Amino acid sequence: MIYATKPAEKRLNVAPLPAAVASPATDSSKASVSQRQGDSIVTAGAVEGGTDTIAASPPAVTAPNAAPALSGGTGSAFPPLLPADITTLKAEGPIVPVAGVALKDLRDSFTEARGGGTRTHEAIDIMAARNTPVLSALSGVLLKFHNSVAGGLTIYASDPSNRYVLMYGHLDSYRPGLKEGDALQRGQIIGFVGSTGDASPNAPHLHLAITRNDNVKEWWKGTPLNPFLVYRSK
Ligand SMILES: [Zn+2]
């Protein structure tokens, strides 16, 4: 819920109320990274003792006038998700983005609490040995390399429709030679599983989040959707 969507939310809120005109996404380059941290997983499964978090918490999210928050203030309301979002992503044929991990091994932790109950995971964790190759789930574009306190080394990439952003967190390293703006092919290695950020060193895993974005240049925004639903066969 803290998913760094404040600017988007602002956009949403502010539009109708001239009074609240947002000073354009005030940039506060420093304050961002700390938005998320200390995330403790509550999962069963010995492997997953890990902690983790992540979230796009890039610069410019501090939103000084985040005040006029509408509704319950979850900050994850824009753009709204549609049932078609899951369908669209499924149709794009995403692969499980960790080498050697099968569909049946995925577990849904999207709604689990993180941060001691202060927020929701809004992602899934894929456990794997450190340095297992992380594969691009879809073709698209590598939007951003990001390093945050919580997420550690993270890659943000777009999907083929350019409306969704996939986030691969806690990487041990990026694949050498990759750079922002590169086209990605589904299945290509983009990095390696790790525990950077606030993941437990004893439980390396890939944190995979997907957001409906609609403007992937603003890769830190978007509304989280459940990756598990995208992978669930039916
Ligand atoms: Zn996670």
Image: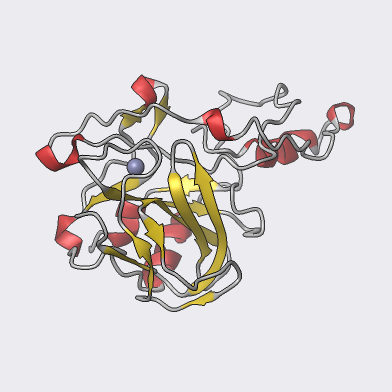
Left or right of residue 54: residue 144: right
Q: Residue at x 48, y 41 (%)?
A: 55
Residue 182 location, x and y as percent?
Answer: 56, 74
Q: Is residue 178 above or below residue 52?
A: below
Residue found farthest to the front: 176
Q: Residue at x 31, y 70 (%)?
A: 95
Left or right of residue 90: residue 154: right
Quarter that holds the C terminus: bottom left
Of residues 172 and 96, which is closer to you in this image? 172
Residue 138 location, x and y as percent?
Answer: 42, 71
Residue 85 location, x and y as percent?
Answer: 47, 59
Residue found farthest to the left: 46
Answer with the quadrant where ligand 1 appears in the image: top left
Q: Residue at x 30, y 56 (%)?
A: 193
Whether residue 82 can be seen here: no
Q: Is residue 108 above or below residue 128?
A: above
Residue found farthest to the right: 19
Colour mapping used in the image: secondary structure
How many numbered circles are shown? 0
Q: Is residue 204 above or below residue 163?
A: above
Whether residue 199 can be seen here: yes
Place residue 45 in its image quadrant.
top left
Residue 2 location, x and y as percent?
Answer: 52, 32
Q: Residue at x 45, y 67 (%)?
A: 88
Q: Is residue 47 above or below residue 208?
A: above
